[in-house]
Amino acid sequence: MIRQCAIIFGCLFAGELLVYLTGIKIPSSIIGMLLLTALLYFKVVKLRHVKAMSDLFIQNLAFFFIPPGVAIMLYFDVIRSQFLAIALSSVVSTLLVLTVTGWVYQKMKKNDD
């Protein structure tokens, strides 16, 4: 379990370090997740090395939504004043993610055949 934590949090730390050193405007957690995905894809890290910890995180996923929920309550006045922009950007970004995900899936599916 310690090894699994070290791999997952090591990728998160590498993402933090990369953002700090380069100043890029991508969240470090996303970079860490992409790094872990690449390590799994290229079989540098085996799935069994992170599966149990990943399963634990997924089983307790609702717990991780508590801080954002509190933040929403604290900034409700700001959210209310910017509701139209937030709603519009949410719809557009959701459609964009669905489109890109479908496109990438189709491309990868063609490569498998």
Image (tube, rainbow, N blue to C red):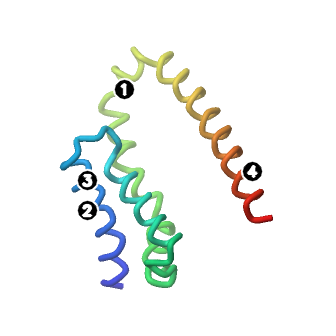
Badge 4 marks a residue whose secondary structure is: helix
Mark 2–mark 4 distance (CA, rounded to whole Å): 32 Å
**N-terminal-most mark, 2 or 4:** 2
In the picture, which quadrant includes the N terminus?
bottom left
| CB under 8 Å between discs 2 and 1 | no
Report the amino acid beneath label 4. Answer: Gln
Residue position for label 1:
76
Between circles 1 and 3, the one closer to the viewer is 3
Say which residue appears at 56% left-offset and 31% top-offset. Answer: 93
Say which residue appears at 36% left-offset and 26% top-offset. Answer: 76
Of 23 and 62, nearer the camera is 23
Badge 3 marks a residue whose secondary structure is: helix
Residue 55 drawn at (x, y percent)? 50, 74
Say which residue appears at 39% left-offset and 42% top-offset. Answer: 69
In the image, residue 53 above or below residue 82: below
Residue position for label 2:
13
Badge 2 marks a residue whose secondary structure is: helix
In the picture, which quadrant includes the C terminus?
bottom right
Residue position for label 3:
18
**N-terminal-most mark, 2 or 1:** 2
Q: Is disc 4 surrounded by few (<14), some (14 to 19) or many (20+) residues within 10 Å?
A: few
Residue position for label 4:
106
Mark 4–mark 3 distance (CA, rounded to whole Å): 31 Å
| CB under 8 Å between discs 4 and 3 | no
Between circles 3 and 2, the one closer to the viewer is 3
| CB under 8 Å between discs 4 and 1 | no
Of 86 and 24, nearer the camera is 24
Between circles 2 and 4, the one closer to the viewer is 4
Q: Is residue 100 left or right of residue 42?
A: right
Report the amino acid beneath label 3. Answer: Leu
Q: Is disc 2 surrounded by few (<14), some (14 to 19) or many (20+) residues within 10 Å?
A: some
